[in-house]
Structure formats: C-alpha cells, structure tokens
Amino acid sequence: MAPRTYEKLGPAGAAASTHHLGTSTALTVLARGGNAFDAAVAAGFVLQVVEPHLCGPGGEVPVVFTTAADPRPRVLCGQGVAPAAATIDHYRAEGCTIVPGTGLLAATVPGAWDAWLTLLRDHGTWELADVLAPALGYAAGGFPLVPRIPDTIATVAEHFRRHWPGSAEQWLPDGGIPRRSHRLPVLAATWERLLGEAQGPSREARIDAARAAWYRGFVAEAVDRFCRTPVRDETGHDHAGVLTADDLAGWSATYEDALVVDAGAGWQVAKCGPWSQGPALAQTLRLLDGTELTYTDGVATADTVHTAAEAAKLAFADREAWYGDSAPVPMADLLAEDYTAARRRLIGDLASRELRPGSPGGRDPRLAALATDHDRPIGKGTEGPGTGEPTVARLGGGAATGEPAAEPALTRQGVARGDTVHIDVVDAAGNMVSATPSGGWLQSSPTIPELGFCLGTRAQMFWLEEGLPSSLVPGRRPRTTLSPGLGLRDGEPRIAFGTPGGDQQDQWQLCFLLAHTRAGLDLQAAIDAPAWHTTSFPASFAPRGWEPAGLVVESRLGPETVDELARRGHRVTDAGPWALGRLSAVGRGDDGLLAAAADRRSGVGSAAAL
C-alpha cells in the first residue's frame, strides 16, 4: 500500500479536481477574492482545454450546489436535449439499431456554455472575461499534455486523417502526434469573439449577451452548417447530424431541487434527478441503511463488498427500467420504505446473475430488448474511433447497425481511454459546488473547423425503442451517467464529491461515502480506500453489453477477500492495486476548517486549500 496522505486543510477555501491546473485555477480565483462559483466556472473552462479527451466546450455539465444564504441543495442542469429531428424513425431509416457512439448522429444541444454562464451570472461575482482568462491563456499560449492525450490521439490518428480532416488539422500538427504541449488557437479565437459580443450595461447583461452569441448567434450558425455534411461514425458509414441552430436557440440550462435522501449515520446525500443515474446511489444507500458494514483497518471486508455490490445491482436494474426523461419516473415509490425493504430482502449470500428491476407502486417494469442481451460478442472491423464515455471491459456489444463494433482502446486494467472530469469547490462564506463536466471528447466527434471544438455524443444513451423512460424523444434529455454529489450531516452541507467513470461514477462514490461515513476515514483516506464496482447491468454507452455477476475490484482489498467474493459467485476481475476511480472531494469540518482531497490513481488530479 502507498504511504498515507492526508486531506489538505485551510480556513479560506478548498478545491479539488481531476487535473492540477483546474485545481490551481480554482485556488487562484479564491485567493483573489472570487467565491466558489467563480472558482468552479474558471476551473471548468480550464479543464475543457487541458483534458480535451475527457470534456470539451461542446459537452455538458450537471452541477449540485448550496449557497451561503441557503443550505438547501439545488441542481443546475447543463445537459442538452435531443434535436427536434432526432426521431427513432429517422435513426432506423439510417440503418441504426442503437444510436452510434461517435460522429454527428449522437449530438445533443451542447449544454456546458450556458450552464457555466448561468451559474456565474446568478451566483458568481466576477466578469466573464476574468473567469475565462486562464482557459483562454492555455488555449492560445499552450498547455501541457498529460500522457493519455497523446495516447488517445494516436488511437484515432488514422481515422482523423481519413475521415475527420478538421480533427487532423487541430490534433495532428504537421501530421504528427503532439507529445509534450499543444495549442488550440481556433478555440481561443472563438472565445475571444464571444467575449467581444459580451456587451451590456451590467455584469449580468454582458453574460447573457455571451450566452446569446453561442445559442442564437455565430456558434449556433456554425454548428448548423457543420452538421449538414455527413461524416464517418462507428457504424463504418457516413451520416449527417440532425442538430440545428433552432435546437440551440430553443434551449437553456435549468434549475431544479436536488434529490435528497437519508444515507444513514445522520447523513443525507443530494443528487440530480432521474434524468441522471444519480438516484441509483440514493437507492443503494437506502438499501444499505440499517445493514452492518464492516471494515478492517479502513479496508472493506468481503461481507461489505458483497452486500454493497448486490444492493447496487438492484438499484441499477431499477435505473434501466425506470430512469430517464422521456416518461414519468416514479421516484417517490422507488425510494419508499416498503419498496426498499422488499428489495433489501432480495440481497442473498450469493452473487445474483439476474437483472432484477422492481415494481414500484405495483407498476410492471419494462426493459429495452437489447438491455437483457449480455451474450453479444465484442468484435472488430468498423472504422470509427473508440465509443462513448468509457467504463470498463465488459462482455457484449453490437455496433449501431447490429454489426460488430470496434473495441475501445483499453488499459492494462481494462479501463477504456477517455472519460470525464470533476470539480469541487468550497469557500469560507459557505458556498459549495460539485460539478461533473463531460462530452465533446476530441476522439468521439469531428472538430468543427470554424470553432475549434467538437460536439458531444450523449444521445447514444437513448434507446431506439418506443415507450421507455430513456427512449429517444426530441426535446428530451438522455439519461446521463454524470453524477455530482453533496453530503449533508443533520441537514448542514458538509462535503461535495464526484468522479469520472461512466456507469461506475455512483458506485465509486458509494465506496468513498461508506469509507467516510461508516468507517470514519477522512476525505483523502476515503478516496484512497480500495474500491470496487459491479458490471452486472447494461452499460449506458455503445455497445451496451453487460456481464452477469461481474465484479471488478482493486487488489488492495486483499487476497482472502477476493477469494471469498469469488466463492460467493462473483465473476471477479482484479483491476490492480490502484485502478478504480478518479474521485475528488471538498468539505467543511466541525471546527470550520475547509478540506480538500483528490485521487492519486491517475497521477493528474490534485487538491489544495488556503
């Protein structure tokens, strides 16, 4: 086990993120008098530059936050919707059985710009130009490349050269792969032009003008033009997009109350609603409430891992049957005590191999036809780059046309290259922010030459089957995996947390929360604690396979625990000692000190306080 590290502490502010430049940006803003919202927005833009394989300007961001004036958790939804022309009939006419994970057909309205600017306008204090300055500086002047960026570019370089010339021009300077640093001058010019249009008599009016320039101005017009030309996607064929300028003009980020549930031991957890997978963590915590979860020297025992994994399977089975934005979700019934108690009784001594959604309020569950198919082989042969927001190696997965899909590039631990980012910030006044930006990955959609960024591909999370909560419906949000979180103790905001990881986000957060609230570990020790997750439910991203009784663990759980889990029927994959999760967290202690902690597994995330 690596040497122990401790959470960072300070009285004036704390920040943590998946990249050290995001964290240092947030701390600089706090040190210069900005609040947590100013800091989070500035860091969010920086991460669009320095982690372009994980998020981008054309992506999306959900935010959970509390303010110094109001401790009630709120959500800002920066998840864009499906275009007006994105109908199931259209995609089937294009030869698709699932939405392709790359290209233009999977594009939703890009939500990150409006969400960040709305958050800044309503809760920040700085001008947009000041908040955007660090990111603009990195884009124009250059930024260091973490190892996975050249690796990602290398994986898709030939595809760029043959099919996505705009991406080749941006990411293959002089035909070669950048290794140490890179510049994004076209993106910098786009941001400069947006700032030039940010005119008005007040800070709020100037921010709104920049929002309008994106969604009803030159950005929307460029997106519309670009989407009309077919491009190659993972099907091996060229398809035009359906996103239009009218789709952008008709959308804006929205606020809503967070979903808040009791998590045991005096804690409550706040999550986004069932248009995200966030309620799966809420359901899992409800299932575990009242159960005995044991730890030895801060490491979960086999009983704890087994029980938590089985509870997660039940929650994620409900996610498949009930969550989405395309039909009403019976959230109150899914969280009801009698329903939870009945589901808790399904947790047995052996690992379940079944996908078992429940019947909240007596309703009959319905799954997508492909959701129960876990025997589709992963093949090779299509020409597109790796698909979607990566999770882990799984069984299953036909391509969008029903033909074999390209296998995503995998690390030695089985984790696909590429992912998401996360930011947490807390300030001395009591503002607390948790945000999980994603989408617009450089490898998943072609760069728009006029703008210097690419569109997101979140629509791949819809099903091309009528009548499901997550069916493709114009104007509706895909059921996203993005899942920031807040923790409250006795109603008082105490921690903000989150992680990249697709379907694993709420499972790795479960490992963190149990280590913190049940085992009593501080934020850093809870992040460092050995993690696990189940793969025994359908993946949210193409090609959407799953592995019955699959369980991925970090070897630091110990050989006896791993052997016992296998004896109980789990199909255990040892991912290595430090492989699962890129968590970050901030918090407020009983003494008023602010804390920050970040994952050490990636070597890139960082935490700091002042």
Image (cartoon, rainbow, N blue to C red):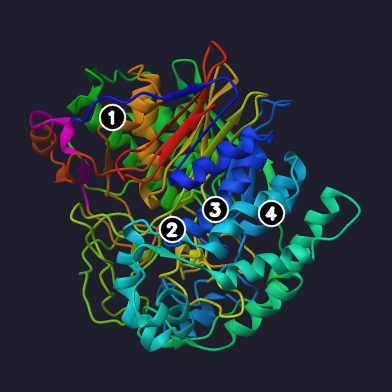
Instruction: Between label 1 and label 3, give the one nearer the viewer.
Output: 3
Q: Amino acid at mark 3?
A: Val
Residue 126 or residue 599, whichever sits in front: 126
Which residue is more in the foreground, 113 or 306?
Answer: 113
Quarter of the image with the C terminus in it? top right
Check disc 1 and report the residue beneath it: 529
Q: Looking at the image, is 228 positioned above or below residue 115?
A: below
Q: Percent from the top left, x then y, of residue 602?
A: 32, 46
Query: Which of the two discs, 4 and 1, labels the residue nearer the N terminus?
Result: 4
Judge from the rendering whether residue 236 lies leftward or rightward of residue 283; answer left or right: left
Residue position marked by numbered label 2 in the rendering: 54
Point out residue 349 in the picture as x, y percentages from the top left corner. 18, 30
Q: Which residue is mark 4?
A: 253
- How far apart marks 1 and 3 lie (CA) works out to 29 Å
Q: Earlier in the sequence, mark 3 or mark 4?
A: 3
Amino acid bearing label 1: Ala
Name the amino acid type tagged 4: Ala
